[in-house]
């Protein structure tokens, strides 16, 4: 089974190609959210070298919304042209760890942070939003041997180690049919409901006769 894995949710982008039990191709690069050239160059190398995949798996975050949208859009295009089976999986469940149980935190903007607990590469808790003090209390309640990861350095939380989701691990996980994969239509993992600004009726433009 030929598997293409795409991961763009963090500052380190990655692509992986797996054929059966063999990881045939792995590429990682600094993920510039304003320039996707490296991603598409590496994707083109894979397409020319290996052809069409049977399965495409995409990391869904949480993390960079723009990066995840680009990954999903590219995967949809490839799925349409190849007929591959398209699935999504939380990026934070694809972080390489020596421990089966670990936690992930991240900056959710608006003075908030997210917390998630992963066990056996499955999401067991969260993502849940906290203020700074609330997250510090949450982390203090963990067992001392529980690793805490983040994809960007957070100076407020000294126990958190920088680790990135891995397309190589995503490809490996995609071989397990018993996992809780997301099916199309795929969307990035939202940490809060999308915010929509409604027009003020008093300032709404009118159409002349």
Image (cartoon, helix red, strand yellow):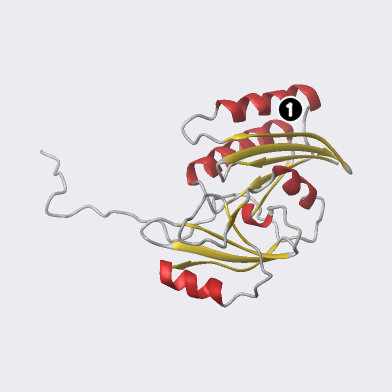
**What residue is disc 1 on?**
46
| Residue 131 visible from this viewpoint | no
* Vertical comparison of 54 with 115: above or below: above
* Vertical comparison of 200 with 101: above or below: above
Element on which disc 1 rests: helix
Please identify the residue farthest to the front as the structure is shown: 158
Residue 197, position as x, y percentages in the image: 28, 53
In this image, 185 relative to 136: left or right?
right
Quadrant position of residue 192: bottom left
Q: Residue at x 56, y 45 (%)?
A: 10
Q: Residue at x 76, y 58 (%)?
A: 98
Tell me how many marks there are.
1
**Closer-to-camera residue (141/193):** 141
Callout 1: 10 Å neighbours few (<14), some, many (20+)?
Answer: many
Please identify the residue farthest to the bottom as the structure is shown: 141
Q: Residue at x 70, y 43 (%)?
A: 167
**Closer-to-camera residue (121/103):** 103
Please identify the residue farthest to the top as the structure is shown: 48
In this image, 147 relative to 37: left or right?
right
| Residue 189 visible from this viewpoint | yes
Quarter of the picture holding the N terminus: top right
Quadrant position of residue 182: bottom right
Residue 140, position as x, y percentages in the image: 54, 75
Quarter of the picture holding the C terminus: top left
Quadrant position of residue 5: top right
Q: Residue at x 33, y 54 (%)?
A: 196
């Amino acid at each position: 089974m030929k598997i293409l894995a795409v991961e763009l949710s963090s500052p380190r982008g990655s692509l992986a190609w797996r054929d059966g039990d063999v990881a045939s191709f792995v590429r990682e690069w600094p993920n510039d959210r304003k320039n996707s050239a490296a991603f598409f160059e590496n994707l083109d190398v894979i397409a020319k070298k290996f052809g069409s995949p049977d399965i495409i798996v995409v990391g869904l975050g949480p993390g960079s919304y723009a990066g995840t949208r680009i990954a999903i859009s590219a995967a949809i295009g490839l799925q349409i042209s190849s007929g591959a089976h398209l699935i999504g999986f939380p990026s934070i469940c694809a972080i390489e760890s020596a421990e089966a149980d670990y936690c992930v935190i991240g900056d959710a903007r608006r003075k908030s942070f997210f917390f998630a607990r992963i066990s056996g590469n499955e999401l067991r808790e969260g993502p849940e939003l906290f203020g700074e003090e609330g997250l510090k209390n949450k982390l203090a309640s963990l067992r001392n041997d529980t690793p805490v990861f983040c994809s960007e350095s957070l100076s407020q939380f000294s126990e958190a180690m920088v680790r990135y989701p891995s397309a190589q691990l995503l490809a490996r996980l995609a071989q397990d049919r018993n996992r809780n994969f997301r099916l199309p239509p795929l969307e990035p993992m939202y940490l809060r409901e999308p915010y929509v600004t409604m027009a003020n009726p008093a300032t709404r433009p009118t159409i002349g006769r």
